[in-house]
Amino acid sequence: MKRIFLLTIALILINTVTQAQSKFSFELTSGYNFGLSPTQIDGLYNYSYVDSATSKISVGNVYLGNGLNLGIKANYLLGNNTQLSLEIENLLGEKNYITHSFKDSTHEFVFYPSMTEIKPSFSFFRKINNLKFYATIGGIIGFGKVTKEYTRQIPGLVYVEKYDYYGGVALGLFSGFSAEYIFTPRLSFIGKIGANGLTYMPDRGKITEAYKNTGTTENMLENMTVSTRETVYEDQITITDNTSPDEPSKALRPYFNMNSFYFKLGIVWYPEGETQEEAQPSRKL
C-alpha cells in the first residue's frame, strides 16, 4: 500500500513538472563586477617597531566588489509578462593590493573575496518581435570568505601570512535591466547590466599559512597558539585579561562592503520553445 501511495505521488509530481515545463527557462551567464564603493580596513598594521613612533598605517581602502561573476539561473513564467527566478552565482574576487614602503622595509597587503551567492528575483518583461526587455529586482544571500595576504620584507627576512575571514553570511539586494534576443524558439542571447548592494559579515577568522624565510624557510604556523591563529567575531565583546592561549581570541565583527555595478552576457534555453505560448494562430487556407 505504501509503495502504491509513493508511486502515485511520484506520478503526480512528474505530471506537474511536465505540464509546467513550457513555463521554465534556464540561463548561463558570465561577466564582471566593478566595485562602487570601498571598504575601509582599519588598523592594517602598526609600523612603529620598524622606523619610528610616527610610522603608522591606520586605514586602507579596498574594492571587494570587483571580480568575475559566473551564474546559472532558472526562470518560471508567471503570466502577465512577469517571472520568478532563482540564480546561483559565483564571485571570484579581484585582488586588491596595498603596499607601503619605508626606508628599510616593504609591507604588502592583498585582499580578495570568494563568494557563492543565492539570488531569488522577480522580473517584469516586454516582448517586441524577437527582443525581450526585462526589469529585475531581487535579494542576495552569500556564503564564502574574504582572504588577506600579508608580506613583510626587511633585509635578510621575508615573512608571509595568509588569513581568512569566513563563516557568517553576506546579505544584500540587487536590481538590473536585461535585453534578450530570441535566436531560435529554444535559444536566446542575453545581456544584463545592474547594481549589487552587498555586505559580508564573517563570524570567524583564521591564519591558514605563516612562514618566514631568512635563507631557509621556517613554518611559523605550528608554533602559534590557538588564540593567535583563530578569532571569533562578535557584535559586542568584553575585554578581559583571562584569555586562554588554547581558545580563539575575540574581536568586534568586521563588515566588508561588496557593492558593485555589473554586466553579464549569456545564453537562455527554453526546453519547450520560447515562442510556443505567444505564437500567432496559423492562417487557414
Image (cartoon, rainbow, N blue to C red):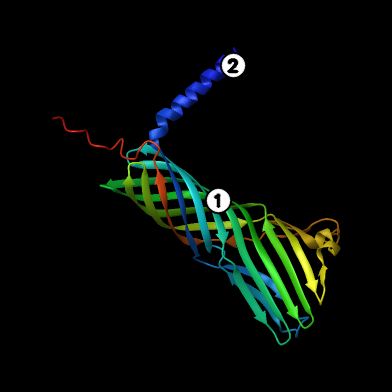
Whether residue 238 appears in this view of the structure is no
Image quadrant where one finds the C terminus: top left
Q: Residue furthest bottom?
A: 103
Observer-side mark, 2 or 1, equals: 2
As drawn, 118 above or below 155: above
Instruction: Give the x, y percent position of residue 8.
Output: 52, 18
* Residue kind at label 1, given as amino acid type: Glu
Q: Are marks 2 and 1 in contact (CB under 8 Å)?
A: no
As drawn, 51 above or below 221: below
Whether residue 7 appears in this view of the structure is yes
**Which picture quadrant has residue 47?**
bottom right
Instruction: Give the x, y percent position of residue 267.
Output: 41, 49
Q: Is residue 225 left or right of residue 137?
A: right
Residue beneath label 2, please? 3
Q: Is residue 6 left or right of residue 137?
A: right
C-alpha span from label 2 to label 1: 38 Å
Q: Which mark is residue 53?
A: none
* Residue kind at label 2, given as amino acid type: Arg
Q: Which mark is residue 117?
A: 1
Q: Identify the secondary structure beneath mark 1.
A: strand
Instruction: Give the x, y percent position of residue 221.
Output: 81, 63
Sequence-earlier tag: 2 or 1: 2
Residue sitting at x 82%, y 74%: 216
Graded by Cα atoms within 10 Å as few (under 14), some (14 to 19) or many (20 or more), the crowding at tag 2 reads few
In front of the other: 217 or 237: 217
